[in-house]
Amino acid sequence: MQLSLKGMKFHAFHGVYPEEKILGGEYIVDIAIEADLDEAGSSDDLSQTINYEAVYQICKGVMQRPMELIESVLHDLATELMHSFSNIEQLRIKIAKLHPPLGGRVGAAVVEEEFSFVKECGRCGKDMICYSNDSCWCHSFYIPAATRTKIHEQYGTTCLCPTCLADYAKVEEDV
Ligand SMILES: [Zn+2]
Ligand SMILES: [Zn+2]
């Protein structure tokens, strides 16, 4: 499923110049999310449904926090989306700062980035989603540090698919 919100307009106070911090400026944000709805990275209770309103509210919240660089705004937005939804396969974010104060007539300063979170499970080879940071669903599995180290030694990563990780979590419970 792909969900996108285009042309979200915000008045925000990002920037390094005083006029940007006091008067603010106009911004346009575009977001596209490719998500796997059948196979969330985790059990159903962890994966919130991705919907337009939730995505818009996250976007609005991040835009309201003044930052110096729109690159940082983009990074924060990506992180918040990862924290909120566990089944994002691909994410594209574009932020345009309209008429940036650069001493001339400039239409917009734009940052754009695309993230891809699909990987192959090192143990079973199945496609899986991992964000490779602490907002990933895989951190919600209780796996003791020693076992994580073992998994890392064997597969070069501690991130396996939910089924494989659940095996390790179970093994530890039985001990
Ligand atoms: Zn696996
Ligand atoms: Zn992960």
Image: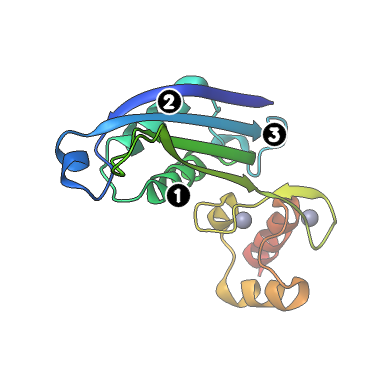
Which quadrant would the N terminus be assigned to in this image?
top right
Check disc 2 and give the amino acid type.
Tyr
Mark 2: secondary structure: helix
**Could you classify mark 2 by the number of other residues whose Cα lies within 10 Å: few (under 14), some (14-19), or many (20 or more)?**
some
Depth order, front residue of 168/111 = 111
Looking at the image, is mark 1 or mark 2 nearer the viewer?
A: 1
The picture places residue 67, in percent across and down from the top left corner, at 29, 48
Q: Residue at x 57, y 70 (%)?
A: 144
Residue holding disc 1? 75
Looking at the image, is mark 1 or mark 3 nearer the viewer?
A: 1
Count of number-bearing discs = 3
Which quadrant of the structure image shows residue 47?
Answer: top right
Cβ of disc 3 within 8 Å of ligand 2?
Answer: no
The picture places residue 130, in percent across and down from the top left corner, at 64, 52
In 3D space, how far apart are the residues under numbered discs 1 and 3 (Cα atoms)? 22 Å
**Could you classify mark 1 by the number of other residues whose Cα lies within 10 Å: few (under 14), some (14-19), or many (20 or more)?**
few
Cβ of disc 2 within 8 Å of ligand 2?
Answer: no
The picture places residue 61, in percent across and down from the top left corner, at 32, 34
Q: Is residue 28 left or right of residue 141?
A: left
Which quadrant would the C terminus be assigned to in this image?
bottom right
Mark 1: secondary structure: helix
In 3D space, how far apart are the residues under numbered discs 1 and 2 (Cα atoms)? 16 Å
Q: Are the residues tagged 1 and 2 within 8 Å (C-beta)?
A: no
Residue holding disc 3? 36
Residue holding disc 2? 56
Q: Residue at x 27, y 32 (%)?
A: 25
In 3D space, how far apart are the residues under numbered discs 3 and 2 (Cα atoms)? 19 Å
Q: Are the residues tagged 1 and 3 within 8 Å (C-beta)?
A: no
